Amino acid sequence: MTAPLLEVQDLTKAFGRVVAARKLNFEIRAGELTSVIGPNGAGKSTLINILSGSVSADEGRIFLQGREITHLPTHRRVRLGLCRSFQVVNVFPELTVFENVQIPVLALVGRARHVLRSLSREPGVADRAMEVLERVNLAGQAHSPASELSHGDQRLLEVGIALAVRPKLLFLDEPTAGMNPVERSEILESIRRLSASGETTFVIVEHDMDVVFALSDRVIVLHLGDIICDGEPNVVKEDEQVRECYLGEEVEE
Amino acid sequence: MGRYLPHLIVGLLGLVFVAIGLFAGRFVLYLTMRVMLLSIFALGYNLLLGRTGLLSFGHGAFYAAGSYGMALFYLHVSSDPLLGIIAGLALAAFTALIIGFFCVRHTEIYFAMLTLAFGMMVFSLIWNLRDITGGDDGLVGIGRGPLLGFSIAKDSQYYFLVLFCFALTVWLIHRIRSSAFGLILAGIRENPQRTSFAGLSVKGYRLAAFVISAVFAGLAGSLGAMLESNTDPFSAHWTHSAEPVLVSLIGGLQTFSGPIAGSVIFVVLRETIERFTQNWMLWFGMILLVIIMGFRGGAMGAPERLLRRIVRKSREEGAS
């Protein structure tokens, strides 16, 4: 049997007396669209920060395809196939849309260190960058500065930047935050399409549960640093504990 | 026609520089060399400030490393100017590698303060190691041996070595700015976090930019030592480190030619004002204030934008 895509063992992290992760153990399997949900303060952001290398864990180990990555810096994890997007727009604002995806493409093909060769002569880089832009439907705006895109398009661009490094595992941190309903359904459709194409396994971290239940194969519920439920969406929906600590607040609204 | 406008401008400027070398008097010759040295210093420096977004207040140390490396090599090993320059560059790169290793872990004000501290450490080393560096006198009596068989002893001859190094710097900086590496540096300026999530080591690239900019500072320093035939401990002082910062600001941080235009303005203004008043700093400061606040994007910001638009338009016309 092959190793799972991501394996987390006894992951613990506390900020002072606030426990953000308490001996978390779980696996993420390739091709399974997984969502991590939980009320505010459940430890979702911390978890994503630890897994992607921005924050180090107090205890525990992380394996990507059987290889330990617990102590690797961010850029090494990205090279091994683990990438993320951010809750707030996080692109290169003054660069063009095209240049935005050119940067990760250059990193992927190992040409980022070319100091004296003109960028326009790097073989295949332009094609690959356009290919990525087509996947996120931004090819038409390739030459405008990223800061001139609409909010929704900037979010899409960010997914594009993350996809350009061809990750095996991609965390999306609240991908629909701050979006209008049209943009929201567009980006969800994009995620579904990209996930179905099979190259990348998506993990969505969300506060908004409507997003999650429609889309996911599996849902993990975090609460105060603990996993309180883990399973298929309809199972999670019926779970007593989840309703109590999380769904309840939504229902009462 | 329009698309060749940049080539035309570069060609004309080249002719002007050559003409100065052939026909100008000693004072103009000397001043032009000072402009070119400051340009080399600032062009390299702006790769770090304008491109990578790192504000260093310690690059005087690398200029001094170039000067002293060159001078020590001349005094103790050989009078060959080419080898002397290489010795200067090597010392500058080595110093930058060590200092940069500690500095690139930090950004913004912390980075600026660390570079300032390291720069002043280099200054006090030079000041105190009297046996090696000559202390406050500096190293004196640096001559210029023949370069590949040609004499460069006279200023009118030496001018062309400086011009060659200046042209080489312009060409190299242009290539770096349009390379993959140059785009990555811009990415780091815009968003270091996103850059590391593109799978790139931000520290590594910052260090590379730091060392490259220091090598250009070292080139300016070693050429400066030969021009003045001595070295100056104050070239490592923070007041000297501030020069490329000012020059880049005057010319425009986000421009290619800004450091050159800034150097011309800086050197010429200072020379002119110094003739009229002792308090040149006061007048100089006020004029700088006007330039920096009056021209957003620096003196070359608007002209470069205009030039780019002309080139783009004529390309589009050519394509259609």
Image (spheres, coloured by chain):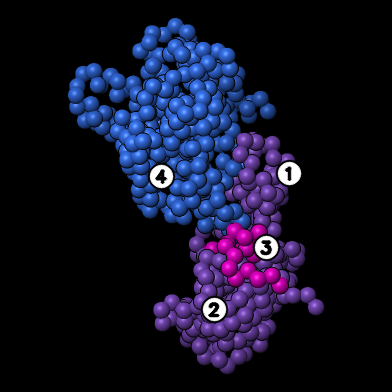
Q: Circle 2 sits on which residue? A: A59
Residue B29, image quadrant:
top left
Identify which residue, A83 or A206, lies in the foreground.
A83
**Residue B289: horizontal and vertical position, in percent?**
28, 34
What is the spatial separation of the Cα atoms under label 4 and label 3, in whole angstroms? 33 Å
Task: Give the label, 2 or 3, closer to the camera.
Answer: 2
Indicate the amino acid at tag 4: Leu
Q: Secondary structure at mark 2?
A: strand
The chain coloured purple in the image: A
Q: Chain of mark 2?
A: A
Q: Chain of mark 1?
A: A
- The quadrant of the image that shows the N terminus of chain A is bottom right
First to last magenta residue range: A66-86
Which color is chain B depicted in? blue
Q: Which residue is most to the top? A: B23
Q: Secondary structure at mark 4?
A: loop
Residue B163 visible in the picture: no
On screen, B234 above or below B185? above
Q: Circle 1 sits on which residue? A: A124
Per the rendering, the mark at residue A81 is 3
Task: Give the label, 1 or 4, closer to the camera.
Answer: 4
Q: Circle 4 sits on which residue? A: B55
Q: Secondary structure at mark 1?
A: loop
